Image (cartoon, coloured by chain):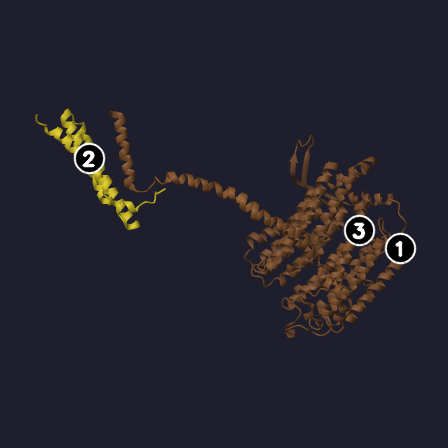
Chain colours: A yellow, B brown
Amino acid sequence: MSISLPEMGIYFSLLLFLVGLLGIMLRKNIIFMMLAVEVMLNAANLAFVSASVLTNTIDGQVIMFFVMAVAACEAGIGLALIISLYRARNTLEADDLRILRG
Amino acid sequence: MSNVTLLLLIVFVPFAAALINGFVLRKARIGIVCAVATLAVFFSFICSVLLFVSNSVVNVNVFNLISISSFNHDTFVVPFAFTVDRLSSLFLLVITGVGSLIHLYSGEYMSHEKRPYRFFVYLNLFIFSMLLLVLGSNMFVTFIGWEGVGVCSYLLIGYWFEDVANSMAAIKAFLFNRIGDAGFLIAMFLSYSLFRSIQYSEIANTLGHLPPQFFSENATSIMLIGFGLLLGVAGKSAQIPLYTWLPDAMAGPTPVSALIHAATMVTAGIYLMNRTSFILVQSHVVMASIAIIGAATALLAATIGLAQNDIKKVLAYSTCSQLGYMVLACGVGAFQYGVSHVITHAFFKACLFLGAGSVIHALHHEQDIRKMGGLYKKMPITTLTFVIATLAIIGFPGFSGFFSKDAILSAAWSGPYGHPALWAVGFVTAGLTAFYMLRLTWLVFFGECRAEHPTHIHETNFVITLPLLVLAILSALGGVIVIPEVFTGHENFITQFLHPVLEQAQAVMASVPRAEHNNAAVEWYLMAASTTLVIVSALCAIFIYRKGPEGGRKFANAFGQLYLLVRDKWRVDELYAAVIVRPLSRIADFLYSFVDRFFIEGIVNGTPGVLYAGTGITSNSQTGMTRSYLKFIFIGILLFAFVLFI
């Protein structure tokens, strides 16, 4: 039994999502954590596109474009925040930023 | 202008001046500030003269301070109302007249101050409060003024608050006054519960129409009202046992001593006794207590005055002593002579204090009379006025004090509640007064100059000397209001003038049988005796101190321990400290160290302590680390998915 391409896309997106999740939980640098978030977003996009092909509808592909637009904005704002955070605290290690500690 | 307008102007113009100085002229030069303050008080003085001349009773109800329509099935209304009658108008003249002279004087005396507006604001507020005190038509308005003058006195004694001693003196004066105020309050409450009113005219009216058994049934309450008022008088007018604040109050600037602690505020007690005379005379015990306290204060303060070396302290004890005379006059039933002595005393004591201020100003704040002497060559006007005022205070024949003091002494002998023993105390006091006043005058103005920089001493400008001259003239001639009957053949002015105010009290006193009636021969003898004593002891003082303060040493040694006791003011302050202050502070220490530190602070600090300890356990989970939060989020989502899908 062979696996069709869209199905492979679904499985691959699951793999990609796990990579992103592990990345965000294991990396300490905020820039890499953001990259991991981007990876997770793209995993979701891949899942949407694959599902769209599987179900023969166009909805998933439309949503993918929305997600890409939002991701672009998020990347821009996120990087700006990271830069100003670095200027203020001189560090990008997530473990050093603990002012919310109880 | 109608009398009502005049009355409102008298009260509120000094208040307006205080506001202007306090808020608009904060950075102005002393000349402007002083001009505003002085002109305001002088304006009040002119209005007071107009009101005095019109000689009518004026009532003004400004607004209702307290208005409760149903209070114990009764309406309870306390109006903010003023009444001017003859008694008030006399006090108005003294307060605004002497007050405006002293305001003027302060313009020069306080010229070295950086921010003089504060001083003049307090002075104007004082005048305002004092006017409320003497104009209030019920006890409550009087009480507002009574408290107001207390506060202003506190602020002005502690005017130079950078020095701790001054602040302590201010606090002492305030606390002693509070004790008296409590007495006044108790009297006010009791008279409401007894007469259903605190308005003087209504109480007088009620008292006049009550059946005799009312007085026998409520004798204790009436006596308590009298004693409450007496306590108030003792606090404000510096009588035993509350007199010790007055000498300490000399820490304030000298114009303050002249205005508040000699001429006006301390005579508030005499005013109150005149105002409530119809209540006081209902109880013999109260009248006798007043007379005894007055006589005792006069004698005690005069003895302390003998051995003081600070020019202002001598004058302060002399004020105490003279206030004792006034209280004695009220106690023996001669209320009007208390008032006449208030007036003459305001003139000569203000003159003495301002003269002392002139000397202190010229000697750059030197107050020790052993370092003065021979100033008559350098300060002729001050010397002249001081000598006139001294002659007035010791009762030298012809000067104002002679007439007013003699009226008191003769009343003490033969007044409605008089007794020869009271006269004897007053008589001895007159001798002591002559001695210490001549000692003071001689050591300051005559003999050799013992000042440190004698060449710099000179008379200050007319702003200082003009009030001195006016007051000296008044203290020489002020006695006309009370020239005795034996000289002129008809009743003296003050008795006639105050008759409407004191009528009711005098009627009560006339109904009391008394031993002897005053006759002219006795009065002549008393007058001759006191005049002789005054002149002899004055000459003794000059003889002993003719060569400076060393002359007194031999004299002092003759008395040994007694002299030391007198010099230490009979150690009354030490007695109070041992009997009242130290036990109180020990209790306070206990309350602080045990009750406050242990119980109160234990509860207050313990509550958050327990909360911190409790919340510490859970707050540890808030690590602040982003990745651990993510971990929880991930676990949460997994659990959610687990519940949702399986």
Residue nearest the viewer, comparing B41 with B143 = B143
Q: Is residue B455 above or below residue B634?
A: below
- Residue B542, position as x, y percentages in the image: 78, 70
Secondary structure under badge 3? helix
Q: For this view, does B75 lie left or right of residue A102?
A: right
Q: Is residue B462 above or below residue B410?
A: below
- Residue B347, position as x, y percentages in the image: 74, 59
- Residue A75, position as x, y percentages in the image: 23, 41
Task: Answer yes or no: is residue B251 visible.
Answer: yes
Could you tell me how far apart the alpha carbons at marks 3 and 2 are, in whole angstroms?
A: 105 Å
Disc number for residue B141: none
Q: Which residue is mark 3?
A: B291
Secondary structure under badge 2? helix
Callout 3 crowding tier (Cα within 10 Å): few <14, some 14–19, many ≥20: many
Residue visible at 8% across and 27% down in the picture:
A2
Going from N to C along the chain, the mark reached first, 3 or 1, is: 3
Residue nearest the viewer, comparing B367 with B401 = B367
The amino acid type, in three-letter code, at marker 1 is Gly
Say which quarter of the image contains residue B137: top right
Position of the C terminus of chain B, as image quadrant, is top left
Task: Answer yes or no: is residue B48 visible.
Answer: no
